[in-house]
Image (spheres, rainbow, N blue to C red):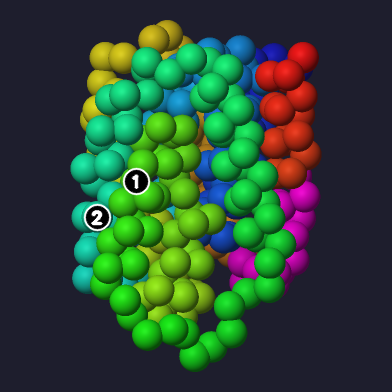
Amino acid sequence: MSTLILALVAGAVIGLALGALGGGGSVLAVPALIYLLDFSPSSATTASLIIVTMTSATALYAHARNGNVAWRTGSLFAAAGVLPAFLAGAASSRIPAAVLTTAFAVIAALAALRMLRPAASEPPERVRPAKAAGVGAGLGTVTGFLGVGGGFLAVPALVGVLGLRMKQAVGTSLLVITVNSLAALTARTGTGGDLRWEVIAPFTGAAILGAWDGKRLATKITAGTLQRIFACVLLGVAAFMLVDVIA
């Protein structure tokens, strides 16, 4: 299968997940870039940030049109992660490839397990600003180091810590992902290695189109079903990456 077709297929799948679930899809971008498209771990995390930033911004617009973005709450949450994302992004180029891959596999497995947990029941918890800031900073750090948006962390935090309903949390998480990814990408400017734009461009285009389809898909299939399917795929990817590092 040609590189272009692989990039288009991978981008479409990731866009579908981001548009439908408000996060999680970006976790597949890095392994797809490494194992399907022959990027180095460092270049893959930088390329992933480009893809995630563009795709999340597009999906954010789609959710905002339906009034599902809590702009003030999301902006405050995202602000806590900007500096950690920038610092982690600047430091990531110094981390050995094997460590990056292992850390990514662990995060992917945790994301999958989090998706398999039952959704939080309403009413949500009382808003706790200190905890919200801590979660936001942690999310920014993960985004900066590993090139993932962190929606799998943002959505439950926005529901449980900041008291948003699920639809608002999905839309608002895209605002957080966009801001954190852009901060991390800024820190990586000039350090991404061979980014191969002939691959990144079609990958991003397919992801953007997939995000629009994902938004429509979410109205036809329950979020629980989508999350379970995606979580199983993600667990398989995480296991493969860990075996690859050990071998």
Q: Residues within 10 Å of mark 2 (few under 14, many from 20)?
A: many
Residue 14 at least partly seen: no
Q: Residue at x 22, y 55 (%)?
A: 79
User: Which region shows up in magenta?
Assistant: 218-233
The C terminus lies in quadrant:
top right
* Badge 1 vs badge 2, beta-carbon distance below 8 Å: yes
Q: Kindly identify which residue carries mark 2.
A: 80
Percent across and percent down for residue 70 are: 31, 73
Q: Amino acid at mark 2?
A: Ala
Decide whether the magenta segment is chiefly helix, strand or loop.
helix
Residue 224 at least partly seen: yes
Question: Relative to 129, is 163 on the left or the right?
Answer: right
**Quadrant of the image occupied by residue 181:** top left
Q: Residue at x 37, y 15 (%)?
A: 94
**Quadrant of the image occupied by residue 10:** top right
Percent across and percent down for residue 134 are: 32, 59
Percent across and percent down for residue 48 are: 46, 31
